[in-house]
Image: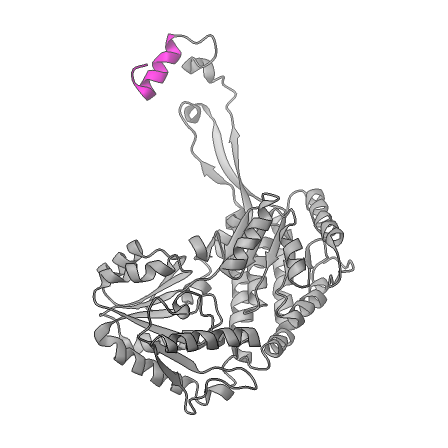
Amino acid sequence: MGAAEHQNLTGFDTQDLDALIKLQRSKFRAEGEVTYATRIDRLKRLKALILENKVEFANTTKREFNGARSYEFSLFSEFGSKVEAIDYSIKHLKEWMKPEKRKTNKPMNFLGGKGQVRHFPKGVVGIISPWNLPFGLTVAPLTSALAAGNRALLKPSEFVPETAALFAEVVPKYFSKDEVAVVTGGAEISQKFAELPFDHLLFTGSTRVGAQIMQAASKNLVPVTLELGGKSPVIIGRSANLELAGTRLTFSKFLNGGQLCLSPDYVLVPRELEEQLVARVIHEAQSMYPNVTENEDYAGVINERHFARLQNYIDDAVAKGAKLTIVGADQTRASEDNRRMPLHILQNVNEDMLVMHEEIFGPILPIMSYGDITEVPDQVEPRRNPLAMYYFGKDKSEQEYLLSHVPSGGVCINDITLHYVQEDLPFGGVGASGMGAYHGPEGFKTLSHPRAIYSQTMIDVLPIIGARPPFGEKFRKNIRKILGAI
């Protein structure tokens, strides 16, 4: 591990950023081949960073959430799962790095021509991470970047400044700044960061900001991976086990106070099952989170701005006719001390309500009903291309119908969010919920350049098919075999 001094870039200008990316690129070029051993070493150092600093990061993130975030949730979601992801990459890296043999065309295939694809590192990767899982969603793409042999610049969210500062303090203990460096600062710095001439830029955040990031990256034709959000529906089929669906829906909606890009946003349920499902959700919420506004297992809303946004959704929906149920013994809207909001269930919702237009990102659960499963695609369409679709049911034909008619980034059947932690599955959005994917082999490929390599036979092939001037009947005959009469 390099011991070079690492900059904590809290007050810098464009020249500082330019110098940093030039340093990483020059070191990358000088390195040449990024060997298997080098990549494994970097992944092991990243794992050590997690294991040796997990407590400090978890406590820091809890402070960022005004003291209202589960320590155990942080350990599991932001640290444990990321260690498993690194172990998975270490286990499979040699396989991913192997050249892929590809077939060659006639007659070269008969004469010794050979084709292959080799995955080369792109170079310097920029990673912009969000505030809701500030550690995990920085480390996850960094794992893919290092496995692919790249160097990386990290830009944690300005909404979690303590976590960003801790990254800037800790990272240099494990990586030299020409390998992995941390940039901290506000929105202006984020804009400058997005305009840097990276070899790839990966952003996790909102659709609105994602569009700005893509526009900034386009100035240098930087390829981007955008992990955005959207309104991920939970579709309850008539064949669903309602107790199971209610339990898993409630558990997932409460994770991080609903502040996850994959959080279930709204529910579509058969009309005759709506009240039964709502009753189950209320029962499970009270069982999992008694005294919810002071419950240490539950996260509060990150800041006053987001809290006000959520309250506005509720007020708007109620004013337009929604039925509101606040799930909690004291029926309070939220704790003033820590912004822990109980679950707010909204029924009788309609398309005019703000809550059905924007990603909720909080503990509000709108319930919509349907008569026949064929109505569901039209109900999802105003919120098309969500990051995930969740289906509960045993009806395979219904399941296949939804897969064919409701596009989404990913799908989880009979559970919620768990496709994200399957390292052998790609994670990514579609349309407004993002582009590109990472995790596991897809992460390696996304942050690598698949280079086509063709080795020609020493036999002179072109005269065999008459493809060297002057062209004659032999060449025309071969053309006719492909195109017909000429």
Q: How many marks?
A: 0
Q: Is residue 178 left or right of residue 403?
A: right
Does 216 lie within the magenta span? no
**Quadrant that contains the C terminus:** top left
Q: Quadrant of residue 417?
A: bottom left
Q: Is residue 202 visible?
A: yes
Q: Where residue 406 sits in the image (x, y, percent)? A: 32, 57
Q: Where residue 321 sits in the image (x, y, percent)? A: 33, 76
Q: Nearer the viewer, residue 216 or 294?
A: 216
Q: Is residue 9 left or right of residue 69?
A: right
Does 475 lie within the magenta span? yes
Residue at 38% across / 60% down in the picture?
A: 383
Q: Where residue 344 sits in the image (x, y, percent)? A: 40, 80
Q: Where residue 402 sits in the image (x, y, percent)? A: 28, 59
Q: Quadrant of residue 419?
A: bottom left
**Quadrant that contains the N terminus:** bottom right
**What type of secondary structure mainly makes up the magenta span?**
helix
Q: Relative to residue 322, is residue 41 depicted above or below?
A: above
Residue at 72% across / 49% down in the picture?
A: 18
Q: Is residue 264 visible?
A: no
| Colouring chosen for the image of the structure | one colour
Query: Bounds of the magenta span?
Result: 473-486
Q: Quadrant of residue 220?
A: top right
Q: Nearer the viewer, residue 122 or 381?
A: 381
Q: Residue furthest bottom?
A: 330
Q: Residue furthest front?
A: 319
